[in-house]
Image (spheres, grey):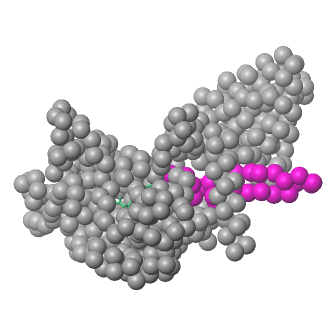
Amino acid sequence: MAKNKENNELMEKIVSLCKRRGFVFPSSEIYGGFSAIYDFGPYGVELSNNIKKEWWKAMVQIREDVVGLDSAIFMHPKIWEASGHVSGFSDPLAECKKCHSRVRVDHLLEEIGINADEKMGLEEINKIFEENKGKIKCPSCGKDEFTDVKKFNLLVKSNLGNFTEDWNKEPIYLRGETCQGIYVNFKNVLDSTRMKIPFGIAQIGKAFRNEITARQFIFRTREFEQMEMQYFTNPDEEMKEYEKLREYRWNFYLSLGIKEENLKWHKHENLVFYAKEAYDIEYNYPFGFSELEGVHARGDYDLTQHSKYSGKDLSYLDQSNNQKYMPHIIESSVGTARTFLAVLCDAYTEEKTGDDTRMVLKIDKKLAPVKIAIFPLLRNKPELVRKAKEVYDNLKSQFMCEFDDNGNIGKRYRRQDEIGTPYCLTVDFDSLEKGDVTIRNRDDMKQERIKIDNLMEYFKDNLS
Ligand code: GAP
């Protein structure tokens, strides 16, 4: 119970930090907000871009066997039939008879220890829901009277390119996952590059889902960004490559500085019919261990389906032995915002400094929104401001820097600690005479003097 309270407080502190310091804003706030959608503010967009940069580096840049892609959000509607999303991409929904809140029945069942997985039919879920009547309460009003459970399709529809009144009959979907764009471009990539199986295609992009309940801040939203890599293998090699990918993805999170004890594997027990194996990497969010990333062995389902629905043969001919086969796919799929939230939760630290408590984001330097904050000791001394601006102008071409001359130095340090800036640099009167500055390290608060002429080299050594 005490741990729960502590965790709720941590979540509240993170949400409040995100708003106060410009990491994350509720969407359309001046219009009263827009449910389950968030905007990333000035520091948030830096952190998010740095996460994506690290992901791209790990998944594309340093790998000879992976290329990138940026496919469009809108695609031919048949793609979503082929993928199974039109018929099967749904969550069980019920409505509270008292307050009319819509609830996700599988989540409510999970809370009382019942695992209602994706494969469970509507009849079975309704039966279990009825049997447990009384135990399940509406999260909004606490009552226990619900309508029958229905399946609610999560695809978001649009009228793109359809100028008729009844566009809803033939909707164009906003993509529910980015990987379908990868599958349908498999042949294009193969024909236009020198890639040979095994190889992967990676992409980062927005996805949209009509999530029934979207709580837990940016963990589950209706518009979100995915970072996905689909790896095409020979059927005989699928599981060997899968094990390699699992290890690679686990190590990625360690490389971001996430504490290993806050990560764990969750094995899917009830696999969809085509899957060979499925694991999630879970992170220990304040609300408990929850899915951060999925690493799944999908067999030949995706390319077989798209071959069937498009009428184009997507099988692969291995020219070394004339073997023809439908490639098997292993995938790594993670939300940028879930990584963002995990990074913030992991880095959030409160520590005693004398009589004071300082809040510091001990975020990996690679991910820090601002790398160096530059201060003139006093804002009303033009010679200090001039020198500090000169240092700032020089460093900003290489590093994300921030100039701050507002308030006393202690307050400026606190502001930078809160957003995780690894280095603060102060220009004082000695700087004018001796040509050096004070650099203060975020984590141990130790200070050292470094010559202005050596600053570029110093930061290249310490920030690369
Ligand atoms: N292509 C596979 C796929 O989309 P998924 O488990 O539905 O699988 C993959 O989603 C990842 O995308 C999740 O592990 C999570 O990180 C992220 N994700 C899924 N739904 C999300 C949502 N509503 N809000 C934020 N992130 C989400």
Q: Is residue 422 visible?
A: no
Residue at position x 66%, y 62% in the image = 8
* Quarter of the figure with residue 439: top right
* Quarter of the figure with residue 332: bottom left
- Is 268 inside the magenta-drawn segment? no
Quadrant into which the N terminus falls: bottom right
Residue at position x 70%, y 37% in the image = 372
Residue at position x 45%, y 75% in the image = 109
Number of numbered tags placed on the structure image: 0
| Residue 313 in the figure: left or right of residue 348 | left
- For the record, the magenta segment spans 336-363
Is the residue 238 above or below the residue 212 in the image?
A: below
Residue at position x 42%, y 50% in the image = 222
- Specify the farthest residue to the left: 311
At which x and y percent is residue 7?
67, 65
Is the residue 34 above or below the residue 176 in the image?
A: above
Displayed-image quarter of ligand 1: bottom left
